[in-house]
Image (tube, coloured by chain):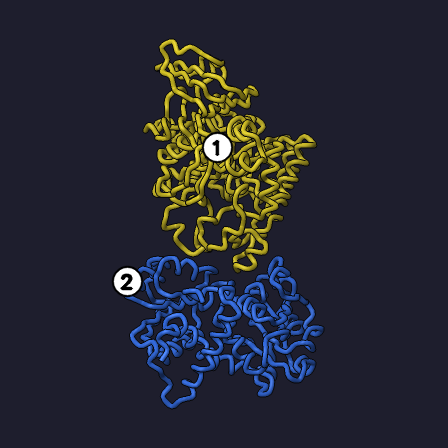
């Protein structure tokens, strides 16, 4: 593995397997009464969040704490950043304080790459603009692996606003690396230019795609996209691309439903689908996020040589 | 002023179709004699053996940032960068603060250029007041000012309203001025960060489709045809735009066009670093576009190589990609990039490359005494360069106040040795004389 985790494309199939195996091992910690191991004692992890994302930040915070790292949370709001401090100065400040790893969430695509140039610390991309969210992809793969023996030939549909989705980009990269067959389903306005180059199939017709899938991953659709004219109304979007009970019935019996959250119930996913105990693995995704992020911090900061 | 004899160089003078070894005798700021084996007769001899002697380079498109952003560049530092690049004439764009939309500002810029004296500065005036695109600036007043402006542009804020551009093209016919347009449809490029294509899709950066350039180029060409006005197209970057210009020229539209060195040497792949030093407007495009721009320069569809030299303060570029302003340096690397990427790669012969840097751009405007011919009586505005010298671009060693060159670390071929402005060295042995 590289020094940082910036993009899912930095990971080979072996890297991904190693992260998932390590996560499975560390998941046992979470099942104990005392949910803590001393692996990263004395190391400092900074959660540097320029965008609000309570769930991702908490997930990283818990992951670091369960490994006994010291955690500091730096949120842009109410900090020197809102007073005009640049990302570079923030980076220099954190570096001077001896931070070992920086987990960054930023509204600008590519911000983690800039940060990695300016610091010695390990940089973990926790979501950059409309680009990538590699730890989300890893936890999604972990969740899929709990249900399916192999990624090889596994059929995964990613449905929704692919154009603006960092979850979609990272998942396409990680899933295709692992040999899954990905189909992107969206209105043409929400697919990026030359999406054919991504190595995924493309469809505009959710009903045609659904019955063949093992995994259906729904993406959050934001109201502002409707305002920007990408589709006419949320109602029409829900009708054409929303996963409701009728569509759930059209899926294969073994197929699962995923969503990175937060959900717009009634838009891209109906409540009955989101809450379906047999089919929805959405709560598992959240739980697995902690184990996968523990694994990443362990591999990036601890490394196998300090494994106890 | 002393006499100089540039001896033994290969004189490439496109305006007189001269390309052979010849001596150039300079006396009192002017070319006195041109020919093989001239006698020194009291003149200081400058050995040009193995070097190319040509007219001083002409840049139709630079940003010198003065007045307003003297922390990024000044007329002095920009002039020095230009001289070191072999230039004797530059045309700064009006997007200063205040905007060069009146006689006062263009006269100040021209006067400051004269005072610095390293290069002739021909300011471009704004077409509309404050570059706001709503009403015409006093174009006639600028044309008749001491700066004698003969080219107007709203630069990076292109004129949206077709009617206003039409009026500008018509109005400026009265003093035979040129309207230079930056072709970009605003609604298709709202928030755009880079060329729209495979790379922008992967990088999650909002795309700037080539069509947004091409549709405005098409509109501009139609309006030039309608009005009979003189149109100049800035930094043509897409293959489709090159094709539109080619077709328009074939049917006799009065249009000239320029291309920037970064558009014939770099592609959108450079954005993968997320380093905003590669962010520019129009954006770096694809291989096929680079190829089309090269071919456009080769067949003369594109008249000129213009740098769009755009200095930015370090702190403005040391940010996240979307937060950075577009623009890159060009004056000190344009000749070498041209020689390396166009001549070295076999697209243009040396004489044609020199033409696109000298008489080509000079033809697009009235820049008396620049761009050749190198003939008796003409002002001795000359560049002397070593076409074989290999050097590595080091941003720390640039004369520009800014550091945002996309060519840092690149090995290039061709280096300016001397630059003369009216017979006086502005650069001698690779060093600025002032």
Colour in which the image shows chain B:
yellow
- Residue B190 picture location, percent across and down: 54, 53
Which residue carries the number 1 mark?
B59
Label 2 Cα neighbours within 10 Å, binned few <14 / some 14-19 / many ≥20: few
Which residue carries the number 2 mark?
A96
Chain letter, disc 1 residue: B
Query: Do badges 2 and 1 share one subunit?
Result: no
Is residue B177 in view?
no
Which lettered chain is shown in blue? A
Chain letter, disc 2 residue: A
Q: Relative to B112, is B357 on the left or the right? A: right
**Residue furthest to the bottom:** A33
Q: In which quarter of the image is the C terminus of chain A?
A: bottom left
**Residue at the (43%, 52%) spot, across then down:** B324
Label 1 Cα neighbours within 10 Å, binned few <14 / some 14-19 / many ≥20: many
Q: Alpha carbon of mark 2 to alpha carbon of mark 1: how far?
A: 45 Å
């Amino acid at each position: 593995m590289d020094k940082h985790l910036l993009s899912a494309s930095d990971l080979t199939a072996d890297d991904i397997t190693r992260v998932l195996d390590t996560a499975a091992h560390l998941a046992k910690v979470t099942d104990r009464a005392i949910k803590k191991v001393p692996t990263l004692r004395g190391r400092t992890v900074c959660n540097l969040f320029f965008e609000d994302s309570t769930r991702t930040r908490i997930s990283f915070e818990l992951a670091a704490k369960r490994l006994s790292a010291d955690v500091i949370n730096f949120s842009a709001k109410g900090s020197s950043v809102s007073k005009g401090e640049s990302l570079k100065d923030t980076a220099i400040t954190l570096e001077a304080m001896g931070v070992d790893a920086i987990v960054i969430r930023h509204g600008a695509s590519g911000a983690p790459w800039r940060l990695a140039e300016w610091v010695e610390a390990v940089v973990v991309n926790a979501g950059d603009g409309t680009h990538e969210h590699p730890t989300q992809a890893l936890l999604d793969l972990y969740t899929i692996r709990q249900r399916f023996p192999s990624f090889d030939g596994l059929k995964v549909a990613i449905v929704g606003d692919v154009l603006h989705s960092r979850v979609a980009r990272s998942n396409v990269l990680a899933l295709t690396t692992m040999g899954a067959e990905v189909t992107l389903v969206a209105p043409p306005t929400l697919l990026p230019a030359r999406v054919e180059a991504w190595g995924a199939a493309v469809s505009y017709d959710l009903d045609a795609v659904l019955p063949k899938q093992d995994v259906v991953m729904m993406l959050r659709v934001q109201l502002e996209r409707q305002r920007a004219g990408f589709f006419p109304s949320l109602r029409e979007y829900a009708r054409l691309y929303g996963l409701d009970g009728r569509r759930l019935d059209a899926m294969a019996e073994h197929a699962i439903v995923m969503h990175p959250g937060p959900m717009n119930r009634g838009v891209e996913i109906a409540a009955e689908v989101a809450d379906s105990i047999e089919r929805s693995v959405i709560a598992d995704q959240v739980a697995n996020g902690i184990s996968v992020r523990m694994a990443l911090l362990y591999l990036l900061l601890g490394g196998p040589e300090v494994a106890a | 002023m002393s006499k100089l004899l540039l001896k033994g160089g290969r004189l490439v003078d496109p305006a007189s179709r001269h390309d052979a070894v010849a001596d150039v005798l300079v006396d009192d700021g002017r070319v006195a004699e041109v020919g093989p084996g001239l006698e020194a007769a009291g003149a200081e001899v400058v050995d040009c053996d193995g070097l190319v002697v040509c007219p001083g380079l002409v840049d139709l498109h630079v940003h010198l940032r003065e007045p307003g952003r003297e922390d990024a560049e000044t007329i002095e530092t920009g002039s020095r960068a230009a001289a070191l690049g072999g230039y004797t004439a530059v045309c700064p764009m009006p997007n200063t603060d205040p905007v060069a939309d009146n006689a006062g500002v263009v006269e100040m810029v021209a006067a400051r250029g004269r005072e610095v004296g390293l290069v002739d500065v021909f300011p471009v005036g704004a077409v509309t007041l404050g570059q706001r695109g709503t009403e015409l600036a006093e174009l006639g007043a600028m044309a008749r000012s001491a700066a004698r402006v003969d080219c107007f542009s709203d630069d990076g804020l292109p004129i949206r309203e077709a009617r206003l551009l039409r009026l500008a093209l018509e109005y400026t016919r009265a003093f035979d001025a040129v309207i230079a347009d930056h072709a970009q449809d605003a609604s298709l490029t709202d928030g755009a960060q880079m060329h729209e294509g495979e790379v922008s899709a992967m990088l999650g950066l909002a795309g700037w489709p080539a069509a947004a350039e091409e549709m405005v180029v098409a509109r501009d060409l139609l309006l030039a045809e309608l009005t009979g006005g003189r149109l100049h197209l800035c930094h043509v970057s897409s293959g489709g735009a090159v094709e539109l210009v080619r077709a328009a020229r074939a049917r006799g539209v009065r249009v000239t066009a320029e291309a920037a060195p970064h558009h014939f040497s770099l592609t959108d792949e450079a954005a993968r670093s997320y380093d905003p030093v590669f962010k520019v407007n129009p954006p770096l495009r694809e291989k096929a576009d680079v190829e089309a721009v090269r071919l456009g320069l080769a067949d003369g569809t594109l008249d000129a190589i213009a740098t769009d030299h755009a200095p930015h303060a370090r702190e403005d570029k040391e940010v996240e990609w979307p937060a950075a302003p577009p623009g890159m340096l060009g004056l000190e690397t344009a000749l070498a990039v041209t020689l390396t990427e166009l001549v070295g790669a076999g697209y243009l012969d040396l004489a044609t490359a020199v033409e696109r840097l000298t008489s080509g751009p000079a033809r697009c405007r009235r820049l008396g005494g620049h761009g050749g011919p190198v003939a008796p009586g003409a002002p001795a505005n000359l560049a002397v360069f070593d076409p074989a010298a290999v050097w590595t671009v080091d941003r720390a060693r640039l004369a520009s106040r800014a550091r945002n060159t996309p060519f840092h670390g690149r090995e290039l071929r061709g280096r300016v040795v001397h630059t003369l402005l009216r017979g006086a060295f502005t650069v001698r042995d690779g060093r600025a004389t002032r």
